[in-house]
Amino acid sequence: MNNQEITILLVDDEPDILEIVGYNLSQEGYKIITASNGKEAVSTAKKETPQLIIMDVMMPEMDGIEACEKIRQVPELQNTIITFLTARSEDYSQMAGFDAGADDYISKPIKPRILVSKVKALLRRVKDNAEVSDILNVGGIEINREEYKIVKEGEEISLPRKEFELFYLLATKPGKVFTREEILDKVWGNEVIVGGRTIDVHIRKLREKIGDEFFKTIKGVGYKIEF
């Protein structure tokens, strides 16, 4: 997939931000479409099915968190990468965004070179995602990546996007120890800054929802999953 085949939806209520971000990304050859609030973002995403959405958090009509949640409910947009464009860096905001289904954050003020680099890194995930099997069956658990659905013993388990992606990553190679650096790179992206305990918090939630016995902590290294 070359840049001309990639559509990026920019969502912000500040025209200057749309212009700056849109200009820098269009220079890279991407097709750029815009929306000025969350409601418009949801309808535009349904119509255009972009590969990447860059969305402000604080907006009128509907904020970015709610818009992200609604977008994630659309089956055709399950694999769309969503990153928030925000000046808010509190852990609470980040966790709320990840729980809503966001993949990453880009901080304001925008630095064009960093923005382009981050977007290229995010879009590499689109390519990587397309090369991985959509359904895994391990340890009696079915993991459907296309539908972001997990079924254990006939019961469907609902997971926020980042928990799902972390579980899916570990389940692709049962017994393999994934280092913390590998997990951050593959689930959060190697350019995103998250709190030191982010992985631990997500693993704890997975233990509670799927079963403590499956997850093994390798002290000082990372985590693995065994069925």
Image (cartoon, rainbow, N blue to C red):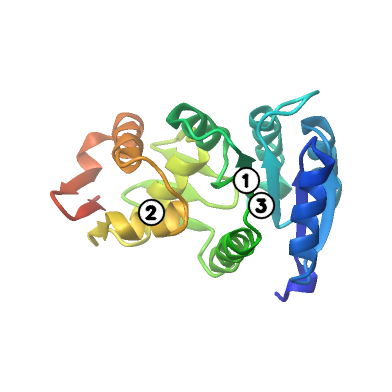
Which residue position holds label 1? Answer: 109
Number of the label disc, if any, that sits on residue 80: 3
Q: Residue furthest top?
A: 61
Which residue position holds label 2? Answer: 184
Q: Secondary structure at mark 2?
A: helix
Going from N to C along the chain, the mark reached first, 2 or 3, is 3
Position above or below: 192 against 12? below
Disc 3 marks which amino acid? Thr
Position above or below: 73 against 111? above
Q: How many callouts does the rendering have? A: 3
Asked if residue 40 shows in the view, the reply is: yes
Q: Nearer the viewer, mark 1 or mark 3?
A: 1
Residue 150 location, x and y as percent? 47, 41
Say if mark 1 contacts mark 2, CB within 8 Å. Answer: no
Which quadrant of the rendered structure holds the N terminus?
bottom right
Residue 195 location, x and y as percent? 36, 40
Going from N to C along the chain, the mark reached first, 1 or 3, is 3
Asked if residue 49 shows in the view, the reply is: no
